Amino acid sequence: EIGKIADREGVNAYIVGGFVRDLIIGRENFDIDIVVEGDATEFAKVVGRELGAKVHTFSRFKTATLVFKDGTRIDMASARTEVYKFPGALPEVDIAPLKKDLFRRDFTINTLSVKINYSDFGKLIDFFGGLKDIKDKKIRVLHSLSFVEDPTRILRALRFSVRYRFELGKHTEKLLKMAVEKKLFKTVEGQRIYHELKQILLEDNPLRVFLRLEKYRLIEELFPGLRWNREKKDTFERVRKLIIWHRINFPERKTDYHLVYLGALFFKEPLERVKSYLSSLSFPEKEGKKLLKFLDEIYGTYRALKSSNLPSEVYKTLRGREEEFLLLLAALFPDVEEKVVNFMRDWRFVEPLVSGKDIKELGLKPGPAFKEILNRIKYEIIDGRVSREDREEQYSRL
Ligand code: CTP
């Protein structure tokens, strides 16, 4: 449909980047990016009007986002149309705007595009050999200055290489090493590094990416003085397993899994040092605060858990805690993992079958004692002194 509109409006439109890459590799990807040779904002408005999607335009960047009724989002950007060097100069017609746009990107595998104009629908466009590099399983930059122009691409290269199990191209690896030696990260806004770090921690296996960061001496670059040892690697592995378990069992709970990894990374580091990492990487304030609180409280919680013998004691220690905190706790301290997992899976959901109303009917006056009674019943159930069935029986007799 969009293709027909493009034909009619006289613009060329292409799906570009990650979506095409993942389509060929066979990985799910729901982020559709469209590049328009022409004005993307104008085009997006027409598409939005005709297909009934909401349109948000950013005129400064000539980009737009379409949000369809089913939640699908499509980003549109304008390929820079030819710049006239001086009034009346001939445009550089030999290079298509799309090609110029793609040339600014990071790796060949991200430069594939598919034309969606109705007349040419589905035509794969591969200016820079991206298809061959996918076949060869190689990450390659488009030109020698790629990492210098944008050092966060160093992190992206390692992230993609782990995700797809691709190797770095020989020349690309050399350039990456040179960029690391020049300590180019120092020149990058912390916020952008934070963003890439978060992307790494949201990958399926961040430990593998971190092992590559280690290989290229980037851990020291990103976190001066941080200890990155066997213990932390083991914790990363445990975090990964717990997250997999959590995703399956609690898919509806919004959880910032990257925070669990960050907690594991910074555990046992001096607080002042952690604070300096947070500020040099411009962590979002809320997230930084949460993380510091976790690190501050987790050992105490562990001690309390260790001496909790009854499930109800575990319950009292852990109730109301954040998902990320609980996962971190289980990952850092294997000897209390079972308690934490039982709490997350069962104990936290126990509700007394007796309600406040029932107690009132027994002739008790409302007040704090009330809550206390209900809590006690809850603890009894959690501890298994009263089975649910017993409770139900008593309840029916009441
Ligand atoms: N890009 C780039 N340099 C960067 C970041 C992004 O050149 N530092 C380009 C890439 O070519 C990429 C596009 O911008 O294809 C969009 O980037 P992103 O939104 O990160 O998407 P994906 O490449 O799809 O990555 P992911 O699969 O992790 O979302």
Image (cartoon, rainbow, N blue to C red):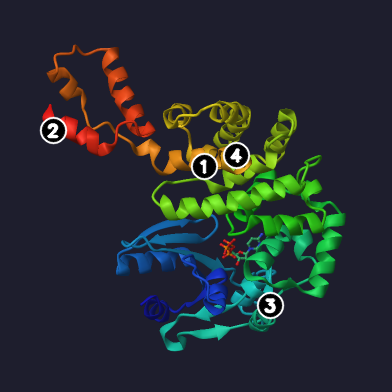
Q: Is residue 380 left or right of residue 149?
A: left
Query: CA–CA distance between discs 2 and 1?
Result: 34 Å
First reached walking from the N terminus: tag 2 or tag 3: 3
Q: Quadrant of residue 303?
A: top right
Q: Quadrant of residue 142?
A: bottom right
Front residue of this view, candidates 15 and 89: 15
Q: Please name whichever residue, 45 or 325, is drawn nearer the observer in this view of the structure.
A: 325
Tell me: residue 227, above or below residue 370.
Answer: below
Determine the secondary structure under disc 3: loop
Q: Amino acid at mark 1?
A: Glu
The residue carrying mark 1 is 338
Indicate which disc residue 191 carries: none
Q: In 3D space, how far apart are the residues under numbered discs 2 and 3 (Cα atoms)?
A: 66 Å
Tell me which residue sits at (54%, 30%) in the image: 305
Q: Name the element at disc 1.
A: helix
Residue 137 is tagged as 3
Residue 304 visible (yes or no): yes
Which mark is first along the chain, 3 or 4? 3
The amino acid beneath tag 4 is Asp
Cα–Cα span, label 4 and label 1: 7 Å
Left or right of residue 183: residue 230: left
Expressed as whole percent of the image width and height from the top left, the position of residue 264 reads 65, 42
Which residue is the site of mark 4?
335
